[in-house]
Image (cartoon, coloured by chain):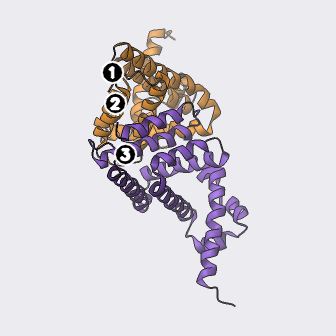
Chain colours: A purple, B orange
Amino acid sequence: MPRVSQDQLDARRQEILGAARACFARHGYEGATVRRLEEATGLSRGAIFHHFRDKDSLFLAVAEDDAVAMVETVARNGLVQVMRDLLARADSSETAGWLGSQLEVSRRLRTDPDFAKRWAQRSAAITDATHERLRRQREAGVLRDDVPLEVLTQFLELAYDGLVLHLAMGRPAGDLGRVLDLVEEAVRRA
Amino acid sequence: MPRVSQDQLDARRQEILGAARACFARHGYEGATVRRLEEATGLSRGAIFHHFRDKDSLFLAVAEDDAVAMVETVARNGLVQVMRDLLARADSSETAGWLGSQLEVSRRLRTDPDFAKRWAQRSAAITDATHERLRRQREAGVLRDDVPLEVLTQFLELAYDGLVLHLAMGRPAGDLGRVLDLVEEAVRRA
């Protein structure tokens, strides 16, 4: 039996993650059954769970990948831009599935201490990226300087959580673009 | 068999609602089994479901009652005060259960069109109360007048949704009191 290289294992892992993301996005966590994950990845459950302990670990790995991507966007463009991107894609079925998964993350954070512990690092990384980006903006003189960075960071995160919940409930986008203008204005120098 | 007056029926209905609210708050929607609802109300399932078609209808009735109370508080004190009250009670187990139920409402809005339809009126009533309160504040000259009331209303609702999701995920309250100061400041005249 030929030995499989680490590169091949990593590539297979990435393939599974990509297909599983599409499956969770389309069907939500509960709807993404093992059978559907098999169809999406083109692999048997045995092959999938060779790379990820169980469906839970697979879901967490997808969510962690998303969080890493979000950290990068926040560092580059800020959390307000992440919100604008999300709003622009709000009507797509992929976003609808992703939002459902986000609510699933929320539910499990509340009910599953192990999951909450594993998720805490990811959540902290997003907060750190937001805080660091605001710090640089303050240095550049575009940010208001009468409110601590920690409070501005939490303000932006509150708006982000609000946007996620609003869209996840399937409510119309309405004037949310102008609402995000207000959010941005509230952290900037007058 | 003596006839039961409408007043007696209404009183019984209110008793069931109160006990069911406590039960949903403590156990969440899924955890509030029919058996637990029987224990909480001291009534048989037959008696409970004489007043409410099923557990779903009972849950909706509790949520509608909460929404009516929220409309009254918003009309009197504004949505920012609703948020401050929620934050002040964030650590209580009753609030934890209530937050869980709110996420349950969110999940069902996304997945259950009938529930979404029944809930739409309640949601609109809260928006109307927020909008009306802002209109009066603008007349009183305390509100900024360079942004449409609809946008300010949505801004406050976004912050409210964000607070609900933040607390429902069990994240610490942190500096959220100061964040709410920022939210309030953003809608007021400079």
Which residue is labeled 2 in the image? B184
Q: Are marks 3 and 2 in contact (CB under 8 Å)?
A: no
Give me the C-alpha separation between circle 2 and circle 1.
12 Å
Image point 57% across, 26% down: which residue? B120
Q: Amino acid at mark 3?
A: Val
In the picture, measured across the screen, residue B180 lies left or right of residue A110, that is left
Tag 3 secondary structure: loop
Which residue is labeled 3 in the image? A142
In the picture, measured across the screen, residue A176 lies left or right of residue A156, that is right
Q: Which label number is shown at residue B77?
A: 1
Q: Amino acid at mark 1?
A: Asn
Q: Amino acid at mark 2?
A: Glu
- Badge nearest the viewer, 2 or 1: 2
Q: Quadrant of residue A92?
A: top right
Residue B142 horizontal/vertical position (percent)? 32, 19
Question: From what the image shows, is residue A122 above or below residue B106?
Answer: below
